[in-house]
Amino acid sequence: KSNNNNNSHKNSKGSTTGGKGFGTPKPIQNSSGIYSKNTESTTTNKPNNNNNNKYSLRDKSYGIAPLPLQTFQEARDSMSLFFRTHEEWKPLFRHVSDEHESLAQSFLRDDASSSSSYYYYSDRGIWGISTMEGKTPWKLLPSKPTDPSHLNILSDFLDEWQTSLLDIPVDALVKEGSNDLHFLEEGRRTIAVTRFHVHTLEVVADVNANSDGNDDKSNNDDDNNNYYGMEEWENELFAKCWSEMAHLMSQDSSDTGSLIVLPSHPDIVPLSRRSSGEEDGIRNEEEDENELLSYLQSFVDDNLRRPIQWLGRQDDWEIVAFKRGNGAIRMLYKLSDIPDLGERDSGNDEQIRL
């Protein structure tokens, strides 16, 4: 039985694993009908001893470390800064919070009302006319992209995701080993994703560009410019993530999730170098990729995992940043545990009630 989730949603509509249903992998497909490009059918019911595999057992996308503990004052300071920064999101945060478990009630009250007021939007209010007209920061997003370039990026990501599954060495001679469990854990998270997005970085012109229209960053020494568009990119990513999380909570269907693929962009990583005063030079691709993943993990912790904990809904979510070719953020809602069939299989025919 998996111990990688904080809770077990055993009353879901069905198991995502169905026992040993991963014997013969096929091209990854989901409920939205998106396929990876890799159409080869490779059986994994034989030992896989290829030492040249791209992915290893260390490349897990689950079993994330718990968030560091905060003191009472640290938590209050963090909540105050977060909800003050995202003031326009308060109606949605109130809507998705657990009134009895939330630590953030005092920060979510409507400032225009009395100090005891704590108003909850209904689903109709959250996804009403204002949202349809684009007047709210959260959006009702489609379940998958339609842009051909985004579909190609997503397809490449699914190819890498399938490769990471095929690289897990599954030994048919072992009834149930750690590799088999790892395969099941990764596989069931793959098929639990029901919504897909691609988030690209749009490089914007420097607001402090020279009057002649030349916005070459080499002509500008101001470190506070937005040449890279990172602030806009982060704000849009924040909006995508919380829009998807709110949608999944409104649907309230177990074993569902959303994936946001983040294509590599040459201008994401150097921001940290600029802030530390380092000069741009010859870039080490591996270092940049590790730095990108570390950045995404920090983004997830600070903007998604910690806030959902403050709202009292952390047991419903598994949210991770991981990398399969490109970086990605995966948000799974009410992921069920792998069912324990040992007790059922140990009984005789008379003891098993159909």
Image (cartoon, rainbow, N blue to C red):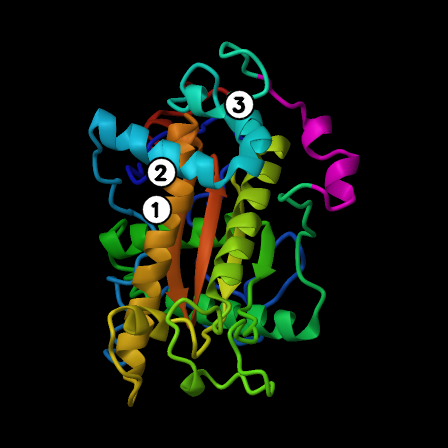
Within 10 angstroms of label 2, few (less than 14), some, or many (20 or more) residues? some
Residue at 78% x, 44% y: name it. Answer: 133
Q: Position of residue 243 (x, y in %)?
A: 59, 44
Q: Is residue 295 left or right of residue 264?
A: left
Disc 1 to disc 2: CB gap under 8 Å? yes
Amino acid under disc 1? Asp
258 shown above or below 103: below
Q: Does any portion of residue 340 appear in the rendered image? A: no
99 lies left or right of 277: right
Residue lying at 64% horizontally and 23% vertically, measured from the top left: 121
How many other residues sit within 10 Å of disc 1, few (<14), some (14-19) or many (≥20)? some
Q: Tell which of 177 and 106 is nearer to you.
A: 106
- The foreground one among 194 and 78 is 78
- Judge by depth and name the residue closer to the eye, 77 or 318: 77
Query: For the point 54% across and 43% down, which residue is it?
Result: 242
For the magenta stretch, what is the residue range? 119-135
For the residue carrying disc 3, how many other residues have a C-alpha within 10 Å: few (<14), some (14-19), or many (20+)? few
Could you say which quadrant of the image residue 90 lies in? top right
Question: How far separated are the C-alphas under marks 1 and 2?
Answer: 6 Å
Residue topped by disc 3 = 354
Residue 166 is a magenta residue = no
- Select label 1 or label 3 by which is in front: 1
Pointer 1 or 2: first along the chain = 1
Asked if labels 3 and 1 touch by Cβ distance under 8 angstroms, the answer is: no
Q: Is residue 122 magenta?
A: yes
Residue type highlighted by circle 3 = Leu
Question: What residue is shown with label 2?
Answer: 306
Residue ID for mark 1: 301
Q: Are marks 3 and 2 in contact (CB under 8 Å)?
A: no
